[in-house]
Amino acid sequence: MIEVEGLTKQYGRTVAVDDLSFTVRPGRVTGFLGPNGAGKSTTMRMMLALDRPTAGRVLIDGRPYQELSEPLRRVGAVLEARSVHGGRRCRDHLLWLAHTNRIPARRVDEVLEQVGLTSVRRKRVKGFSLGMHQRLGLAAALLGDPPVLLLDEPVNGLDPEGIVWLRTLTRRLSAEGRTVFVSSHLMSEMALTAEHLVVIGRGRLLADTTVERFIAENSKSYVRIATPDPTRLRAVLATEGIRVTDTDDGALAVHGTDPARVGELVAAHGVVVHEIAQRSASLEEAFVQLTGDSVEFGR
C-alpha cells in the first residue's frame, strides 16, 4: 500500500504539489490523472525519493522509499523510458540492476521473455525505439517481482498490440494482489485499465474514487434520438417539460429522462423515430469537465 500524506513540493514561489493526500491500495489498478503541469510526475518522483518534499511524506508499506532495503524487490517503477545509457546492451543493463539488489541472473532472462525483448537482449540500447525503451523499463520494474508498481505514461511509444499487452499485464498484476499505480494521458486506455482514479489539478486533489463514480459525478448521460421529424418531436417533449439539444450528427439529445419514457411519448403521439439509445459520457468527457479550471496550458 502507498500512503501519501500532506505531500507538498514548492520551487521558489511555485507550488507544484499542494498538501496532497491519498492512498493507493493493492488488488486494483489505480489511475493517476491530471492536466499537463498538474504535478503528477513530481508526485511520483517524491514517491521514489528522487525529489525531496517541502512538506509531507510518502510511505510504502509503512516506510519511506529511501529506507527500503533492496528496493527493487519492493517497488518497480517506470518514470523516464529513455533514461538508460545508450552504450549498454539490453541484457547487461538488467543484469547490472539485478546485481545491485541480489536478484539472480536467471530472473533477467525471465523478464526479457515477459516483455518481448529476448531477441534483442544483446543489442545496445541506443538503437532502441521508444516502444522498446518502454518494454525495457517495464522489464526493470518487474525484475524484483515487486508487490508495488509505479508506471508513468507507460503506453508512450507502444503500438496497438503493445498497448493491449500492457493493459492485460497490469490487470493481471493487480489481480495477484499487487499495488499498481499508473499515470497516463490516454483516457480511452485508462477507462479500460483502471478501476480506481486519483485526479489532481494544480497540485491539489480533485477526486479519489472509482472510475464509474467519477464519470457519473462529473458528466451527464442523455437519450439520443434520430428522427425525420425533429420539429414535431421537440414539440411533444416540450409539452412534458423535457429539455432537448442538438447533437453534432443531426440527432437530438434528450436530457433528464430515460429511453423508456421517451419511447412511450413518441408512440403515444405517432412520431416516427429511427433510433432511441442511452448515451453515457466517456472518461475523457468527465475528466475535461472536472479539470477545465485546472488546465495550465489551455487554449
Image: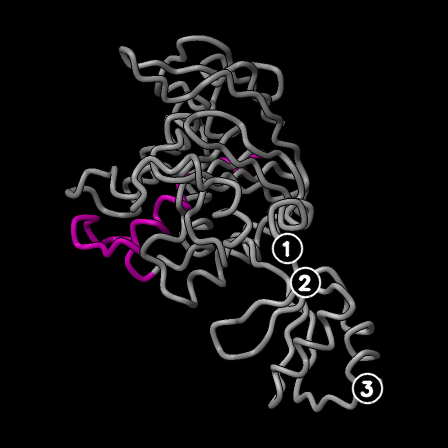
Mark 3 vs mark 1: which is more N-terminal? 1
Q: Residue furthest top?
A: 55
- Residue 267's disc is 3
Against 290, is 263 above or below? below
Q: Nearer the viewer, residue 58 or 209?
A: 209
Please tell me whether mark 3 sits on a helix, a strand or a loop.
Answer: helix
Colour convention of the picture: one colour
Span shown in magenta: 119-147
Q: Nearer the viewer, residue 203 or 138?
A: 203
Residue visible at 44% across and 15% down in the picture: 8
Q: Are marks 1 and 2 in contact (CB under 8 Å)?
A: yes
Q: Nearer the viewer, residue 38 or 31?
A: 38
Q: Position of residue 180 (x, y in %)?
A: 56, 40
**Disc 1 packing (10 Å; few <14; some 14–19; many ≥20):** some
246 left or right, relative to 232: left
**According to the image, label 2 marks what residue?**
255
Q: Position of residue 56 (x, y in %)?
A: 50, 10
Residue visible at 51% across and 79% down in the picture: 250
**According to the image, label 1 marks what residue?**
220
> Can you tell which quarter of the image residue 254 is in?
bottom right
Is 123 magenta? The answer is yes
Say which amino acid is labelled 3.
Ala
Please tell me whether mark 1 sits on a helix, a strand or a loop.
Answer: loop
Q: CA distance from mark 3 to mark 1?
A: 25 Å
Q: CA distance from mark 1 to mark 2?
A: 8 Å
Residue visible at 56% across and 36% down in the picture: 198
Against 3, is 87 above or below? below
62 left or right, relative to 134: right
Against 71, is 267 above or below? below
